[in-house]
Image (cartoon, rainbow, N blue to C red):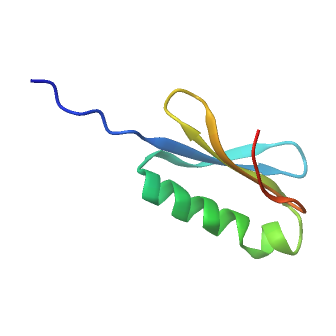
Amino acid sequence: MALPTVETFDVWQYFIDGTSERVRKGASAEEAVEAAKHYSDNVAARVLGITKAVRIIDSEDYVVFEWQHGKGVTFL
């Protein structure tokens, strides 16, 4: 009997200068959402605009959540 596959997610933040940083790797859905909330709701994102976007990406490389500075949560 095969064990059920547990979905994991990566969380990325994208900066105004065009660079990006993976801030979570292999996170559970709950951990990914908590991280995305943190990185999209901090001073660098909301006030300074240094963080331009935050994305949650699933194990098949699909974007399942995106927040953009000045727009909020968007869908691709």
Residue at the extreme top: 1
Identified at 17% across, 31% down, the residue is 3
Q: Is residue 70 above or below residue 13?
A: below
Say which of 1 and 9 sits in front: 1
Instruction: Determine whether, in the image, residue 11 is placed left or right of residue 28.
Output: right
Residue at the extreme left: 1
Q: Position of residue 37 (x, y in %)?
A: 62, 66
Say which of 50 and 11 sits in front: 11
- Quarter of the rendering occupied by the C terminus: top right
Identified at 62% across, 68% down, the residue is 38
Q: Is residue 31 above or below residue 17?
A: below
Q: In the figure, residue 61 lies in which quadrant?
A: top right
- Quarter of the rendering occupied by the N terminus: top left
Instruction: Determine whether, in the image, residue 7 is placed left or right of residue 9.
Output: left
Identified at 67% across, 63% down, the residue is 39
Instruction: Determine whether, in the image, residue 9 is placed left or right of residue 69.
Output: left
Q: Position of residue 21 (x, y in %)?
A: 68, 46
Q: Is residue 51 above or below residue 24?
A: below
Identified at 78% across, 52% down, the residue is 53
Instruction: Determine whether, in the image, residue 1 is placed left or right of residue 6.
Output: left
In this rendering, the count of numbered labels is: 0
Q: In the figure, residue 41 lies in which quadrant?
A: bottom right
Q: Position of residue 7 (x, y in %)?
A: 39, 39
Q: Position of residue 27 (x, y in %)?
A: 44, 49
